[in-house]
Amino acid sequence: MSAALRLQQLLKPQLGSGRAEITVVEPQPYLTYHPLLAEVAAGSIDPRHVVVPLRRVLPDCRVLTARITRIEHAARRAWIDTAPRGERGTPTEIAYDLLVVAPGSVSRTAPVPGLAEHGLGFATVGAAVGLRNHVLEQLDLASSTRDPALRQAALTFVFVGAGYAGVGALAELEDMARYAVKGYHNLAPEDLRWVLVEATDRILPEESLDLAAHTLAELRDRSVDVRLGTTLESAVDRVMSLSDGSRFAARTLVWTAGVRPAPLLRDTDLPLDAAGRVRCLPTLQIIGPDGEPLSDAWAAGDCAAVPAAPAPSTSSVSSASSVSSATVPPVDVELCAPNALHALAQARLLAENLVAVLAGRPQRPYRPERQDCSTSLGIGRGVAHTKRGHLTGRRAWWLHRARHLQRLPSLDRRVRILTGWFLGGLFSREVVSLGSVEHPRSEFEAGFPER
Ligand SMILES: Cc1cc2nc3c(=O)[nH]c(=O)nc-3n(C[C@H](O)[C@H](O)[C@H](O)COP(=O)(O)OP(=O)(O)OC[C@H]3O[C@@H](n4cnc5c(N)ncnc54)[C@H](O)[C@@H]3O)c2cc1C
């Protein structure tokens, strides 16, 4: 969306006169701003406010609510499937002149027994709302049951994977549940058990070591049981077996163990790196099958292998046609981490480079700016890095909110979120489960006599 938005601005005259056309193909009719999903799960942000409707912000583009199933760049053809989610249609072919590839990434799952049956994901607005309702339902269940084993399992929450999604969701939900238990006569914050399981020896691999260490200290301070160097071996019958030998029952298992590039990339004729991403020059041009940069295809975001610092030979990059193979970065070059900061900045540059090629001007290489890291860990809690060092607590939380508000690519959404935060400060938190909205037909169906 960000690339299309910038292209729409830069190509305004050509779009108006019909000399150019931008087609955006996306199965969701909106952009999801993932960094604020944890606050959606905690109820601090209305779900509708972290999504930006594509048709509203891209009025000069042709927006197709569809999925690309295949790209044959050699023939400048793509196939799109407009069938609704969960259904399979017959893909139709569209032709193009220039290609922008930005399908992001998907959750990396693993063949853990019981995971498919009991695990919950956390990458969409629906998953964030569903998880919030599920956690609140567990408090209702624990408070109402007389079975101590069931109560214990309902109050045990396991998150696997300590990246943005796992850490943010756990911290925000722990904070919400700690507040919510005040409303139950027989539950106390100490009854809740939060476990974060991480296979590597650190959390937040996308962030600096310093910020990760401060976040870990904050989580442990809040009695979150963080297990580094540990994996989930089984979740059969909702019994968690960890590689450190521990076994315990838990009714909540959230799987946030990293991402892998979007599956679409495997159905293209674009060469991929060992991790399955599209290899790119610092100009974001895709490197073609013959190892030479393509002059009509760009990629950005999680799906793109973009050098973290431009190689010296690319500092003065010439026009697309004159970029030599010498500018192709070595295979072992350090790459940009998959995060929203890189994705948004690359998207804008991509649009500018594409227009530069059309105008015969030189392209610019992507130069990552200093990453302003921060994480929200619940209301009034956070960790953030600034030029002068690190902040924790309320000041870090305010800074985190301000940074994401500024990055959210929609003024309308910024104002709505800000208003919600302001109102949230005036009234008590909403902590009621609306899980029934996920099954809108159940009451109606119950009205039919048994067959
Ligand atoms: C829960 C969560 C929390 C996060 N928190 C942070 C954070 O705090 N800070 C941070 O910097 N980053 C964070 N990230 C990472 C950040 O959101 C991603 O790095 C960023 O969204 C990548 O942008 P993208 O445009 O490459 O991909 P996306 O934002 O994933 O967009 C890709 C789009 O392509 C579409 N698509 C996929 N396949 C197809 C297809 N076949 N046809 C058509 N369209 C397709 C998808 O529907 C999607 O809308 C978080 C991610 C998650 C999931």
Image: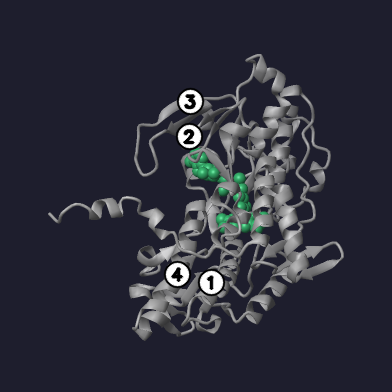
Residue name at image x 68 percent, y 72 percent: 215
Residue 110 in sight in this render? no
Indicate the quadrant containing the C terminus: top left, top right, bottom left or bottom right: bottom left
Which numbered disc, 4 or 3, marks the residue closer to the eye?
A: 4
User: Of helix, strand and loop, which one carries label 4?
Assistant: strand
User: Of helix, strand and loop, which one carries label 2?
Assistant: loop
User: Of helix, strand and loop, which one carries label 1?
Assistant: helix
Q: Which residue is mark 4?
A: 253
Badge 2 amino acid: Thr
Above/below status of 239 relative to 74 = below
Residue name at image x 58 percent, y 77 percent: 228
Which numbered disc, 1 or 3, marks the residue closer to the eye?
A: 1
Label 4 vs label 3: CA separation?
41 Å
- Of residues 343 and 284, the one nearer the viewer is 343
Q: Position of residue 161 (x, y in %)?
A: 54, 68
Q: Which residue is mark 2?
A: 65
- Of residues 391 and 350, the one nearer the viewer is 391
Cβ atoms under marks 4 and 1 closer than 8 Å:
no
